[in-house]
Image (tube, grey):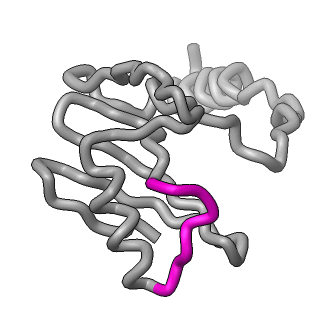
Amino acid sequence: MKNPLLFLAAILLAGCSALQPNVRSYTPPQRSSAPAPVSLSESLSPSEQVIDVPQQSSGRKGGELSDTVERMARKTACLPAQPGATLIAKTGAVETYQVSCQDGQQQLYKCEQRQCRMMN
């Protein structure tokens, strides 16, 4: 070998061409514009669970605080379309109510430890 530098340069150039990445085009998968719906049970933490409330004879689901929530709705100028607030979800210590107003509005209330507040 006459010139070790020339030999080293040849090895480096050969190695660089061997390390060139194989470039491929990437097409991302199609995404839908609407997010996937999440059920109530999927949105709860593992320590919470949904408790089924039996239907009352009037056809509406009521809870312990239905009358309280209905009074709160009246204070916000919502005249309930049906008597009482509808219990839509109940976990251990939290009840969620929906009130349908005569003007078409919907109001949601969350009651925790007998303290209720409007959510919307």
Q: Does 1 appear above or below 45?
A: above
Residue 26 in view here: no
**Residue at 50% of width from left, 86% of height from top?**
77
Image coordinates of residue 63 in percent, x first then y, are 33, 40
Image coordinates of residue 34 in percent, x first then y, are 78, 47
Image coordinates of residue 7 in percent, x first then y, are 59, 23
Residue 8 in view here: yes
Decide which of 111, 77 is in the foreground and name it: 77
Residue 21 as seen in the image, left or right of residue 32: left
Residue 111 as seen in the image, left or right of residue 11: left
**Residue 78 is a magenta residue:** yes
Decide which of 12, 36 is in the foreground and name it: 36
Image coordinates of residue 37 in percent, x first then y, are 66, 36
Decide which of 18, 62 is in the foreground and name it: 62
**Residue at 71% of width from left, 20% of height from top?**
18
Magenta stretch in the rendered image: 77-84
**Residue 114 is a magenta residue:** no
